[in-house]
Amino acid sequence: MAVTLADVAARAGVSAATVSRVLSGNYPVAGATRSRVLRAVEELEYVVNGPASALAASTSDLVGVLVNDIADPFFGIMASAVQSEMGPEKAGGKLAVVCNTGGSPERELTYLTLLQRQRAAAVVLTGSAVEDEKHTTALAARLRRLTEAGTRIVLCGRPPLPEAATGRADGADGADGEETGDSTAPITVAFDNRGGARRLTEHLLALGHRRIGYVAGPVERTTTRHRLEGHRAALADHDPQLLAASDRLTVHGAYDRSSGYDGALELLRRAPDLTAVLAANDTVALGVCAALRDQGLRIPEDISVAGFDDLPFSADAAPALTTVRIPLHEAGARAGRLALGRESAPPGGVATVRTELMARASTAPPRVN
Amino acid sequence: MAVTLADVAARAGVSAATVSRVLSGNYPVAGATRSRVLRAVEELEYVVNGPASALAASTSDLVGVLVNDIADPFFGIMASAVQSEMGPEKAGGKLAVVCNTGGSPERELTYLTLLQRQRAAAVVLTGSAVEDEKHTTALAARLRRLTEAGTRIVLCGRPPLPEAATGRADGADGADGEETGDSTAPITVAFDNRGGARRLTEHLLALGHRRIGYVAGPVERTTTRHRLEGHRAALADHDPQLLAASDRLTVHGAYDRSSGYDGALELLRRAPDLTAVLAANDTVALGVCAALRDQGLRIPEDISVAGFDDLPFSADAAPALTTVRIPLHEAGARAGRLALGRESAPPGGVATVRTELMARASTAPPRVN
DNA sequence: CTGTTAGCGCATTCAT
DNA sequence: ATGAATGCGCTAACAG
């Protein structure tokens, strides 16, 4: 049917092994032979049989990138950055493939199984993790199995798995755990969501805002929790009273535009005298802006709005959106390099990338009545 | 090392063949045996070895989705829709993986090779194609080889390959071409870009605009060309003079925000009396808006702006963006079904999805001076 | 530097 | 309905 190694070998007048060697490149082969083989490959339009190769070598060149929402640039940028490090053009290039979990824990596990089945070389999990006892345990178990199978795991934009779930409960099997030679713990590239949110809220407080609404992300998500914690920490530092009031001024929703729209309306209903609204991310912030405008409020004259992430469109919004910049591309690229083992793991296995306040036109001092 | 079929077989007290049968499900197995096997699978946490399975069966459950820019929701939405049809949760589920070409023809070919190497079950190519003689030929050749290898090909959001490139030049090999039994020609889900652009321009003309700038996409791309053709057709129909003037009022750039910004400035330089600007897509339109605003122009009072695609953020822009809606999700889902063979090919192998004018607040009659 | 020899893990005949 | 045997195409020792 298809052209095989043997065909190429015959054509080039060498053995299959030799062809394999020139193709993988990691073995000395005489220049003359090499070019002869290469020519045969060209002429026959030979393409390696991935499965066969993976079976024999018990490793594949597949790298999985799991994202919560492929239609969201937040993930698109990271995924693109990861892929940019894989160099599929080169000989040793990996095939970076992105898998869309849609934020569903089940699909996350399913994809991990599928990738394990493919004997993926590495897996990068991006974005917030679901904070659910059961799921965390299941996830940790699956990741452990992947690791044991030689798949490198990198977490990007989510915190390390909690110690409890790592399941080192079976620690009785030897003090030095030498048995799983390749068993590297997952490496993490975490975002400083807490710090970013804190600085953002401090920015609003400094402008004079005291009644600040918060349209948070989905509950039970690490990112949601961390950003909220940063926000509340800033409030608490400034005035415990504000912290007490913040519960009523916080609503939860998905990471999408309509949650922002609905959330803003709900907040306005609860507290018509709000002077500022913080959103779970930039997309949500746009929805917030739309709702506020529909209510006849001007931004930032009547009410300030801020987002999070600093996606490309945020600078172009009208007015330009105050937000917190996360170096998504850099983070993704680093995750990619870590996944390939091209960069050594940070001390402790966790690197935290800084976030930066981007104060723009959508926030201003509250109106003085 | 890892758990294998044989391990499961031993555990269940049956032969490997039987285990294989219950797992693939396409063969009669006694109920009792089946459940015994299933339990063994559970207990051993067995995960099929994809490469081995693919090698033996000479097909894999991988489906590739090629996109030009994974950070662009235009592609994210389509990719997500394709994946939604794959059902990785189910037994016969495929692993839909998206590959980011970055719009580079070389990477497109590279990914196709990688997917061919993996013996992908299907490949979906989304978005505009590069119109370059050499590349088109190379692409056609590679697609033909994939098809011959049993990989189903679906084009989504791009026109069918030109006849010339399909290389049916070797037609001498028999009138009924029975030899390649599986060799189905690529199926296409095309967008009516031409019609959409035409209606959009007609909308502006009806509002009274006559000096209309056009910030087009990259040259040598099918989408760019089709949208421009629709625009020019509308102009020609209305007044040949307008068509003649349109060359000077057209600039090209990438499908991104900054192209819109720069393009708008350039157009303003060439024709300060413009009353409307059409953009290659919504993202570009946002850049156009930003530039115009920076020049002190109000939208739509001083100048109208329109985009294309109707991405989710367009309705939320301020002002809401007039644009042309493409049912990206539906198109992607259909492409996914076609890729799986779950839906039969449309007559002629080409389905064209309708586009719809979304007239919103960013377009209005020109100011009367 | 190159050829020979064994499997890798599974799907699939062919028997039973 | 199940088991035994064969080979998918390639890589990785091992010789030479």
Image (tube, coloured by chain):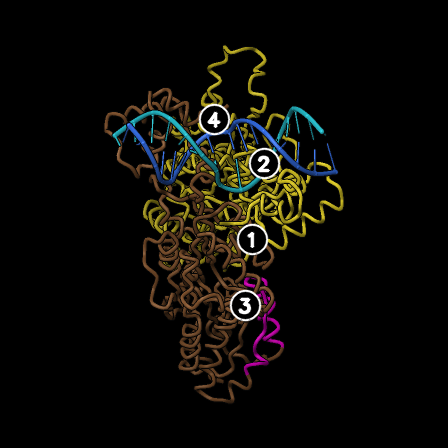
Chain colours: A brown, B yellow, C cyan, D blue
| Residue at which label 1 appears | B360
Q: Are marks 4 and 1 on the same chain?
A: yes
Disc 2 on helix, strand or loop? helix
Q: Amino acid at mark 1?
A: Arg
Q: Amino acid at mark 4?
A: Arg
Disc number for residue B145: 4
Q: Residue at x 41, y 59 (%)?
A: A184
Q: Earlier in the sequence, mark 2 or mark 4?
A: 4
Q: Are marks 3 and 1 on the same chain?
A: no
Estimate the x, y position of residue A241 in percent, counting from the top left.
51, 89
Between label 4 and label 1, give the one nearer the viewer.
4
Q: Amino acid at mark 2?
A: Ala
| Residue at which label 2 appears | B339
- Is residue B342 within the magenta segment? no
* Marks 4 and 1 in Cβ contact (< 8 Å): no
Q: Residue at x 44, y 26 (%)?
A: A4
- In this rendering, the answer to whether A131 lies above or below B44 is below
Q: Residue at x 59, y 21 (%)?
A: B181
| Residue at which label 3 appears | A221
